[in-house]
Image (spheres, helix red, strand yellow):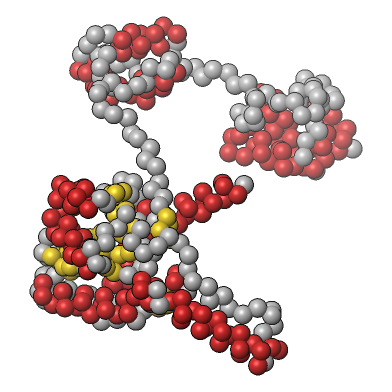
Amino acid sequence: MKREFHVQFCERRGVQFPSATLLGGQRGSLTSPSDRRTAVLLIEEANRAGARLRKCVSELGLSIRTFERFGSQGEHTRDMRLGAQHPSPGNALSTEERQSILDVCHSKEFSSLPPTQIVPALSDRGIYLASESTFYRILRAHKEQHRRTRAQKPQKRQIPVHRAAAIGDIWVTDISWLRGPVEGAFFYLYFVMDLYSRKIVGYEVYGRESSQYLADVIQRATLREGGSAPKILHSDNGSPMKGTALLALCYDLGIVTTNSRPRVSDDNPHIEALFRTTKYWPGYPYGGFSDLNAARVWIETFVTYYNDHHRHSALNFVTASEMHNGGHIEILAQRQALYEKSKMKNPSRWISGKIRNWSPATDTWTTPSAAQRERRLATA
């Protein structure tokens, strides 16, 4: 009886059965917005009259989910499936209006100006053609949206990827702020670290940032390392790192300088991690240093701890000094022998049958994530 009611209801509305006519013919074909509206209205009215919703939608070859999609948030008024044909909106610009916008952009007066300058200028004359976004859209459609000045296009910088396989291959450097005795007053911490061994080879605290100060720290670090300068000095894009004093020193010492990409701190992660370790070390004065000398004394204590006592996880838990002077080889070999001896004494405690790997660290990359990507591409 419900089926008869539904069929009679559709026939009274002038809709032919079967439902293939209503829904566009073959299965999988696109349904026009008008057919969607008709289907939703018929099903809703039949359901209100007492017919079951599942039966109503099945009579038109639909599922309940499709009916809900047709009727949710007015979606039945527009077919959102890929390939659906939509009528042009009534507010679209005509061909003549689009051409008038192009003529304005081509004119001698506005040919060197962007739409953000053209539209206000026309508004001052009582002329409105379209919004700035419409100007841009039309120019892009005609491949005319180009830079109209001599300014260079934004350049895609390459990720700085360098490999340190030995002591002195790469030094990384940066400058960080240390809070002073009053709000807004800071001291500046200069760090230089050997990337392979993680040893802090140069450090100092000054009252301001300066390329000359950084050059002095690099020069003293070179003398401290027996006059052996690094092959590469990697830093960020700060002005002291690109200053004349530092670049002149690097040129004299034969050091190649590389920089991070602008506004990308991840390109120099090891020195950033060192600064974090510094400021989270127990005893760090979060209230600020009383004066410059107090900051220098505290940093001296920290560097001694970090180089000679802190066992670095990336170095398989040897200190930076041990890694730097080569003593880590014997230390790690002793650990390996101890674990093998312990396993032989009580093998049942080693369930997997393997002991911990105490092999020395091999190499380090300036940007580990980029290096891993290159390795995956090379082995793909």
Position of residue 126 relative to residue 302, above or below, is above
Image quadrant assignment for residue 272? bottom left
Look at the image and tell me whether residue 131 can be seen: no
Task: Tell whether 49 sits left or right of 204.
Answer: right
* Residue 255 rendering spot, x and y as whole percentages: 27, 51
Look at the image and tell me whether residue 311 can be seen: yes
Q: How many marks?
A: 0
- Residue occupying the point 69% across, 33% down: 40
Position of residue 252 relative to residue 342, above or below, is above
The front one of 257 and 179 is 257
Position of residue 67 relative to residue 281, above or below, is above
Position of residue 291 relative to residue 186, above or below, is below
Image quadrant assignment for residue 268? bottom left
- Residue occupying the point 62% across, 31% down: 80
Task: Tell whether 235 sits left or right of 314.
Answer: left
* Residue 109 rendering spot, x and y as whole percentages: 22, 11
The front one of 34 and 180 is 180
- Residue occupying the point 70% across, 26% down: 31
Image quadrant assignment for residue 203? bottom left
- Residue occupying the point 89% across, 37% down: 1
The front one of 269 and 333 is 333
* Residue 302 rendering spot, x and y as whole percentages: 26, 77
* Residue 172 rendering spot, x and y as whole percentages: 31, 59
